[in-house]
Image: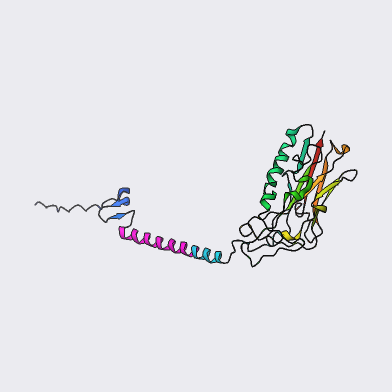
Amino acid sequence: MFIEKEHKPEEEKEPQTSWKDFLYNPRTGEFVGRTASSWGLILLFYVVFYAFLAAMFSFTMWVMLQTLDENTPRYRDRVPTPGLVITPKSLDIVYSMSDPLKYAPYIQHLESFLQQYNDTEQDKNELCVAGKYFEQDAESPKKACQFKRSSLGFCSGLADNMFGYAEGKPCVLLKMNRIIGLKPRGDPYINCTAKTESPLQMMYFPSEGHIDKMYFPYYGKKAHVGYVQPLVAVKLLLRKEDYNKEVLMECRVEGTDLRNNDDRDKFLGRVTFRVMVTE
């Protein structure tokens, strides 16, 4: 008796997935595990999300800009006192009278800086009343007061285009940094002292290093077109015994409420520089 063996159909093998199917599955139409509609919804979400963020950022920036004045900084309490700046821009003025090439850069710098103070340029500005603040809060555009280089006397470079460097009596120019709205009280002037064994004689232009109030307040670069800072020129009357020696100079703004003795900032209301002239 023969027993007929029952043939069982082979179990269907499940198709194996591969990395190619992960990238694109032709049976389901999925790309990297998602259908086209799924990817479209995700893309739409991020487009709307980032568009909203950009719009919100732009709106907040616009609101902030409405509170600002293009001519005046909103906060001006960090620098209540201006620094003092020297021209030529060197804290070490060292040269030999016998070598014109050594002091030529100082002369060129002074002449270039004073071009904006030429009388022909300053005639375009206003002839202001001395001793009074030139306030123009309600006026636009703002007017600038005249400061002519001819008022600097022997340090103007007009009578002596060497500014005293050739004869060993160099000139330096001093000015205060611009601060919008600054109105110094009192009667400001520049005073310089030299740390030498015997007192060093100096000449100031304008007289006594005076800084007139009519150059204050300053209204900003855009609003106050043509404004130039008032200058004080100091001519150092070095003697023969002062040559070949280092002379340490310190100049300060005096006669006012402006600070000039802050140990944390040695340029606040003052400046220190070194002069050495050799024969």
Looking at the image, which residue sits at the far right?
A: 198
- Relative image position of residue 34 (x, y in whole percent): 33, 57
Residue, x 76% and y 32% (percent of image)? Answer: 99
**Nearer-the-camera pick, 240 or 74:** 240
Looking at the image, which residue sits at the far top?
A: 98
**Nearer-the-camera pick, 241 or 170:** 170
Say whether residue 35 is visible.
no
Say whether residue 175 is visible.
yes
Residue, x 46% and y 64% (percent of image)? Answer: 55
> Is 130 positioned to the left or the right of 227 in the image?
right
Residue, x 67% and y 50% (percent of image)? Answer: 120
Q: Number of labelled discs?
A: 0
- Relative image position of residue 113 (x, y in whole percent): 69, 46
> Is 66 positioned to the left or the right of 17 in the image?
right
Is 63 colored magenta in this rendering? no
Among the 4 quarters of the image, the one containing residue 142: bottom right
How is colour applied across the structure in the image? rainbow
* Position of 144 relative to 277 (above/below): below
**Nearer-the-camera pick, 209 or 24:** 209
Residue, x 87% and y 43% (percent of image)? Answer: 196
**Nearer-the-camera pick, 84 or 268:** 84
> Is 119 positioned to the left or the right of 239 in the image?
left
The quadrant of the picture occupied by the C terminus is: top right
- Relative image position of residue 199 (x, y in whole percent): 89, 46
Looking at the image, which residue sits at the far left?
A: 1
Question: Which secondary structure is most common in the magenta stretch?
Answer: helix
Among the 4 quarters of the image, the one containing residue 226: bottom right
- Relative image position of residue 229 (x, y in whole percent): 71, 54
Q: Which segment did they paint magenta?
A: 36-57
